[in-house]
Image (spheres, rainbow, N blue to C red):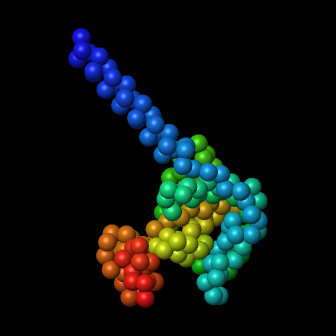
Amino acid sequence: MTGKILAAAIMITAFVAGVSMYYLQVYHFYEQVEANGTSDVQIAALSDGVPRAVIYDAFEAIDSNSSPIRYRACFTTELTRAELEQSYIPYPEAVPLTAPGWFDCFDAKALGAALEQGQAQAYLGVKDIEYGIDRIVAVHEDGRGFVWHQINRCGEIVFDGNRAPDDCPKPPAALGGSDG
């Protein structure tokens, strides 16, 4: 009888722990991001690489302090593909990261397919918004836009514990860089 009670207690504890971990990962750590109207949607200009604010509407975003790559946003813009291509830096290595299922405006699989098929184009939003992390902006032909953070080449190397290549910015001391 004691064995059955102990087994039941273990099963209940495991169930509660599993539900708690799921809730924390999918819901708890995310917060809605309020639009500020200026830096919500920025794309790096071809002319000088400086991020420029883009006119947008219908902005929705989430973020989390627990990871720099949890940022996701959706918006709409009236900029045409030709205007975007003439003005902003393309980002050919864009790989949309999945969002929690409840943030239903951001479908990473559909966006990834649209990028591969040429129905959407990705641009550099902000280079190294945090060391090794780029903000990427992708815009669909119909004006739907998406924003996410993605680890860049320098970040991949440094986060794997390797020395930053000479063409990368110097990592902060916490990532193995020197204070100077």
Q: Is residue 8 left or right of residue 115?
A: left
Q: Is residue 143 left or right of residue 1?
A: right
- Residue 17: x and y in percent read 40, 35
Residue 155 appears in view: yes
Judge whether 101 appears above or below 131 on screen. Answer: above
Give the quadrant of the C terminus: bottom left
Residue at 49% across / 66% down in the picture?
Answer: 150
Q: Picture quarter containing residue 50?
A: bottom right
Q: Is residue 34 left or right of residue 152?
A: right
Judge whether 142 appears above or below 1 on screen. Answer: below
| Front residue (pair 46, 51) | 51
Q: Is residue 179 left or right of residue 43?
A: left
Residue at 42% across / 30% down in the picture?
Answer: 16
Judge whether 34 appears above or below 50 on screen. Answer: above
- What is the number of callouts on the image? 0
- Residue 65: x and y in percent read 54, 58
Residue at 76% across / 59% down in the picture?
Answer: 57
| Front residue (pair 107, 42) | 42
- Residue 44: x and y in percent read 63, 78
